[in-house]
Amino acid sequence: MDRNEVLLVGRLSAPVEDHPLPSGDTVSKWRIIVRRRRHRRGAALTDSVPCVTFNPETAAVVRALKPRDYIEVTGSFRCRVFGPSAAKIWRYEVEVSSARPYEAELTEPADPVGDGGVGSLTVLIPRQVPYLAPAV
């Protein structure tokens, strides 16, 4: 089954920008800065991920944060096409369905259940996922 689910945890890069649409709706836009693993030369690289939402409640949560605050968002990856047929512009972004401030220093419960049962789902701290081998 196809799935389009995105979970990002990073820092808010700048305040939210609201853009009214001709339909009367408002689209709220912002970027999240997400660190990558350390680069071979020792420099930490980052990605700046564009995010949007049409949900006023979600936008209010993000609007309450300051730049450089940690945030967790969930949503779907989208590709949008803008412009006339002769000069199309392709944009990739995360359409956010929920957002919340993220506590950077979460601790695990004192007695986590490690048997792989339902109790182990109580610890939902993001973990690092190994990268795929680079293409040759």
Image (cartoon, rainbow, N blue to C red):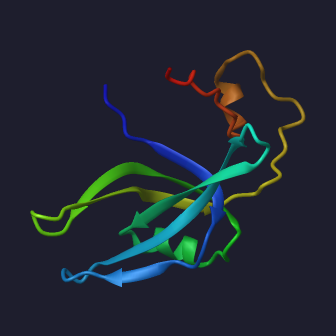
Asked whether, in this view, residue 56 is left or right of residue 72, the answer is left
Tell me which residue sits at (74%, 49%) in the image. 44
- Outermost residue, left side: 85
Is residue 55 shown left or right of residue 14?
left
Q: Within the image, what quadrant is residue 63 found in?
A: bottom right
- Is 39 situated above or below 44? above
Residue ID at (18%, 69%): 83
Left or right of 129 in this view: 59: left
> Closest to the observer: 29 or 89?
89
54 or 67: which is nearer to us?
A: 67
Query: For this view, does 2 lie left or right of residue 42?
Result: left
> Where does the N terminus fall, quadrant-wise?
top left
Q: How many marks?
A: 0
Residue farthest to the top?
A: 115
Q: Residue 105: image x %, image y %?
A: 83, 52
Q: Is residue 121 shown above or below 135?
A: below
Residue 74 in the image: x percent, y percent?
Answer: 50, 51
Using the image, determine if residue 1 lies above or below residue 78: above
Residue 74 against residue 32 in the figure, above or below: above
Give how far across and how far down residue 30 sits, in percent: 50, 70
Q: Residue at x 76, y 41 (%)?
A: 41
Q: Residue at x 50, y 23 (%)?
A: 135
Examine the image and state in which quarter residue 81 appears. Answer: bottom left
Q: Which residue is nearer to you in this view: 90 or 75?
A: 90
In percent of width and height, residue 92 lies at: 37, 55
The one of 104 and 113 positioned closer to us in this rendering: 104
